[in-house]
Amino acid sequence: MDTSQRIGVIGGGLMGAGIAEVSARAGHPVTVIEATDVAAKAALGRLEASLSRAEAKGKIDSAAAVLDRIAVETELDAVADAAVVVEAIVEDEAAKVALFKRLDEVLIAPDAILASNTSSIPIMKLGVVTSRPQQVIGIHFFNPVPVLSLVELVPSLLTGEETMARSRAWVQDSLGKKAIDCQDRAGFVVNALLIPFILSAIRMYESGFASAEDIDRGLVLGAAHPQGPLALADLIGLDTTKAVAESLYEEFKEPLYAPPPLLQRMVDAGLLGRKAGRGFYTYSR
């Protein structure tokens, strides 16, 4: 994909900011859409901090030059001329469906790609609410986006071959990521395997079988995992973990996908992991 083509990112949280960053680092002009001025300011700060770290580590020559390619706006019309728009808002089906209806009205280019970074919601449910389901696809990045190379490409039954090919070219040739192909089933490949594993660790901790520290140390030292499942849940966000689990359970009705009561209570209490300062562990903010 030509790097002169604009990339739109809806949502400037951890995932959205990461997608915006790697797109701008690849040379694309990028427009990030946030819901409010306060959220837009926070997204810009997130980008500035990440790019400053990248510059300090020698990953990029100039954080300022990359930031010059990024605009953070609050009106959806600002992505009207984008070649690709990636939705990265809250993991809520109704919110995503409403957004895709609006994007279908806003986007000018008849061949614009409408992508979702959802980790669990079937792409078909988003495609059918638009007038161009053949251009709707799942492009699922992993956190932290600037570091992890994997991207899941998820076509629905109606996604066109050209959309799939253009999405792969953008992800691999422009962004330098590695893509795997997934069927349009809740959880796709990685989360369909990962979430039951994390839920099992939560049940083990909930039952008093072992401490959080020992569960995580066991997987790090005994299975060569880079971090344990409870620390990973904190990184993902316990609200996101719960939402993905619920989506998996709704689709497959298998007990291993059901969120444990402890996870439900922690989310209700606002103990969401790293982003909240406390989850299974406590973090400085």
Image (tube, rainbow, N blue to C red):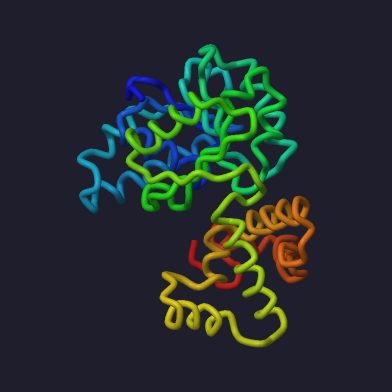
Q: Is residue 232 left or right of residue 158?
A: left
Q: Is residue 256 placed above or below 151 in the rendered structure?
A: below
User: Residue at the location (38% across, 31% down)?
Assistant: 169
Q: Is residue 207 left or right of residue 28?
A: right
User: Residue at the location (55% across, 70% down)?
Assistant: 229
Return the residue nearer the eye: 86 or 50: 86
Report how many numbered discs are placed on residues in the image: 0
Q: Quadrant of residue 38?
A: top right
Task: Locate residue 220, reporting x and y percent.
Answer: 44, 77
Locate the N terminus and report the quarter of the image it occupies.
top left
Task: Locate residue 4, reporting x and y percent.
Answer: 33, 20
Residue 38 in sight in this render: no
Residue 142 in sight in this render: yes
User: Residue at the location (31% across, 36% down)?
Assistant: 25
Task: Locate residue 225, reporting x and y percent.
Answer: 44, 72
Q: Quadrant of residue 237?
A: bottom right
User: Residue at the location (64% across, 48% down)?
Assistant: 120
Q: Is residue 53 left or right of residue 91?
A: left
Q: Is residue 214 placed above or below 200 in the rendered structure?
A: below
Q: Is residue 137 left or right of residue 227?
A: right
Return the residue nearer the eye: 74 or 251: 251
| Outermost bottom residue | 209
Q: Is residue 283 placed above or below 183 in the rendered structure?
A: below
Task: Locate residue 116, reporting x and y percent.
Answer: 57, 36
